[in-house]
Amino acid sequence: MKICIYTIELRVILEKAALRQSCHLIDEQSLRTLEQDLQALTPEDKPESYFDTDRRLHDLVIGSCGNKRLRHILRALNGQIEQFRRISSRQPERLKQYA
């Protein structure tokens, strides 16, 4: 269980760095589309809808950061924690804390 927590903590630290780098580089249309998709999610949606939208958010931030090495490291980490994201996406109420 600790390895899961440590992996997620590392991802958070690195994704914050990616977000700082990408905030001015993210394509406006991609951001608007993702925002609309996030707002359209409802409690009736399948957990997979939450997972897919969450993954697209992370991919947008990572893909836009402009740092190839950081992208590579984060993608490797995300491969390790893909299952954690699937589990957390089954709890749609967690999105309310970020609204």
Image (cartoon, rainbow, N blue to C red):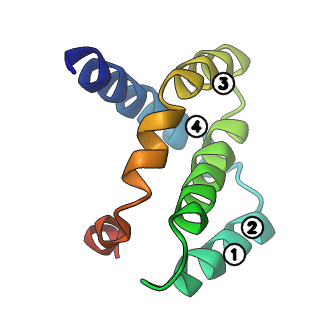
Mark nearer the N terminus (1 vs 4): 4
The three-letter code of the residue at mark 1 reads Arg
Q: Secondary structure at mark 4?
A: helix
Mark 2 or 3: in front is 3
Residue beneath disc 3: 71
Q: Which is in the foreground here, disc 1 or disc 4? A: 1
Figure quadrant of residue 13: top left
Task: Tell us which disc is closer to us: 3 or 4.
Answer: 3
Q: Which numbered disc flags the more N-terminal residue, 2 or 3?
A: 2
Q: Secondary structure at mark 1?
A: helix
Q: In front: mark 1 or mark 2?
A: 1
Question: Measured along the vertical axis of the image, is residue 52 above or below residue 45?
Answer: above
Alpha carbon separation for disc pair 1 and 2: 6 Å
Between the residue at mark 1 and the residue at mark 4, the CA separation in whole angstroms equals 19 Å
Do the residues bearing badges 1 and 2 touch, measured as CB atoms within 8 Å? yes
* Amino acid type shown at disc 2: Glu
Residue tagged 1: 32
Q: Amino acid at mark 4?
A: Gln
Q: Which residue is mark 2?
A: 28
Mark 3, secondary structure of its residue = helix
Q: Nearer the viewer, residue 56 or 85?
A: 85
What kind of residue is marked 3? Answer: Arg
For the point 66% across and 54% down, which residue is it? 56
Q: Is residue 66 left or right of residue 51?
A: right
Q: CA distance from mark 4 to mark 2?
A: 15 Å
Query: Where is mark 4, residue-wise?
Result: 21
Tags 3 and 4 in contact by the CB under 8 Å rule?
no
Label 4, residues with CA under 10 Å away: few <14, some 14-19, many ≥20: some
Q: Residue at x 72, y 31 (%)?
A: 66
